[in-house]
Every structure is written in structure tokens, then in C-alpha cells.
Image (spheres, grey):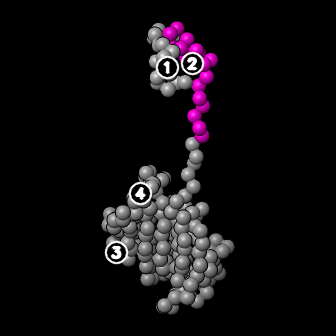
Amino acid sequence: MSTREETLEVDPTEMIWVKVTLPHQLCCNLYIYGCYRPDSGDADFLDALNTSLERIAGSTNNTVIIGGDFNFPGWDWQEKTLKPKTHFVSLHNRFGDIINNFGLTQIVSEPTRLGNTLDLIITNRPNQVNSTQILPGISDHNGVYTEFDANPMRKKQSPRKKQTGKDLDSLHQVCCSKYKVLVTRQALKTCGFC
């Protein structure tokens, strides 16, 4: 089931948030964010992104996938540094700080327009990324195709140790002597202690 999360959308930026509740996941939601940042000098966008992420940061179990045209041409994402002669250095650095502060990873490393990586996929679950490809686009940008694993590996519960007769005798003795409770061996078997 998916719903638009307008409470995460901050004016005046071009963004949309969707929350997807996965039926097999009891404890988390998938938040997908799409955006367009038209002006490379737009500081309001960074405020809006930071505010949105603060609103969903309360739960560490949520999966976040952010995608869009961010227009930060000064980033060299392979080296994770700024290119020489970058304009709006403080905005580029602030964007990098937001990514780091929320435990996010930017996964696109190839250029998407004129030698710059402007179109990004950012997530807090990079281990769930199966593949990312740059495909020819229908505009002046190439498209970014990314596959995510919606079924992350789950921890397997170790089998419960079957109690032995010796364990049962010890438990019976503790209950009777320390806690002054009369517990029969049959009651302990009924409760699943052996």
C-alpha cells in the first residue's frame, strides 16, 4: 500500500514523498522521494530536504530512497570531493553534510549530463542496491536505472534449547526454595519448560 506523504513536502521546492508499506515488513516503511532542484544556487531546497529527513528520522527501521535532478555539478561522486572551480561551494558542502548526517549514501557514480552527475539516487540502505545503470535519456539528461532488493536478508532465529530433566529439577528447586512457590514437575512441562 502506498500513500503520498504531504507532511514531508516543504514549500516552495519541487518534491514529492511517498510512503510504501510492505506487507511482509512488520516494522518499517519505505519512503520514496522524488525531486527537481532547478537552480544550482537554491539554498531553500537544502532547508526543505533537511526538514523532510528530520521528520522521518525518528525510526531507524525506515528505508529511504531519494532520487532526482539535484543540480550539484561541482561534486565528483567517485572521489567524494568537490571539483576545482566549483560554484556555490558552501551549498555543495551543505548537501554533502545532509547526506552524511542522516546516514545516507549517494550511489550514482557516472555522469548523467555533460560530464556531470546531476541525477542522483540516495539511500540509507546501500546494501539493498542490486544494480545501477545510466541509460540514454529522452531529454538532455541520461536516465538512472536502479534495482533495489525489497526483501532484505533477515536474521534467522536460533533454535530454542530443549530443557533437560536436570534443568527441570534445578528450576523446580529454585521455585520451591528461593521463591517459596510450590511448582510441580507436571506444571513446568505444561508451561513448555521441558
Earlier sequence position, callout 2 versus callout 4: 4
Residue 100: image location, x then y, percent: 56, 62
Q: Which residue is mark 4?
A: 23
Closer to us: 96 or 36: 36
Which region shows up in magenta? Answer: 158-177
Residue 150 at x, y percent in the picture: 50, 63
In contact (CB < 8 Å): disc 1 and disc 2: yes
The mark closer to the camera, 4 or 3, is 4
Q: Which mark's residue is nearer the viewer, 2 or 4? A: 2
Q: Secondary structure at mark 4?
A: loop
Q: Check the picture and name the quadrant holding the C terminus.
A: top right
Judge whether residue 165 is colored magenta: yes
Q: Which residue is mark 3?
A: 12
Disc 4 from disc 3: Cα separation? 33 Å
For badge 2, the amino acid type reads: Leu
Neighbours of disc 2 within 10 Å: few (<14), some (14-19), many (20+):
some
Location of residue 114 with respect to 101 vertically, above or below: below
**Three-letter code for the amino acid on which mark 4 is drawn:** Pro
**x 34%, y 75%: residue:** 12
Q: Is residue 131 above or below residue 167?
A: below
Kindly identify the amino acid type of the residue bearing the numbered disc 1. Answer: Leu
**Marks 2 and 4, how far apart at CA:** 40 Å
- Using the rendered image of the protein, determine whether residue 50 is visible from the camera's viewpoint: yes
Instruction: Write down the residue under mark 2.
Output: 168
The residue beneath circle 1 is: 188
| Separation (CA) of disc 2 from disc 3 | 67 Å
Residue 120, how many percent across, how many down? 53, 75
C-alpha gap between disc 1 and disc 4: 37 Å
183 in magenta: no
Query: Could you say which is closer to the camera, residue 189 or residue 85?
Result: 189
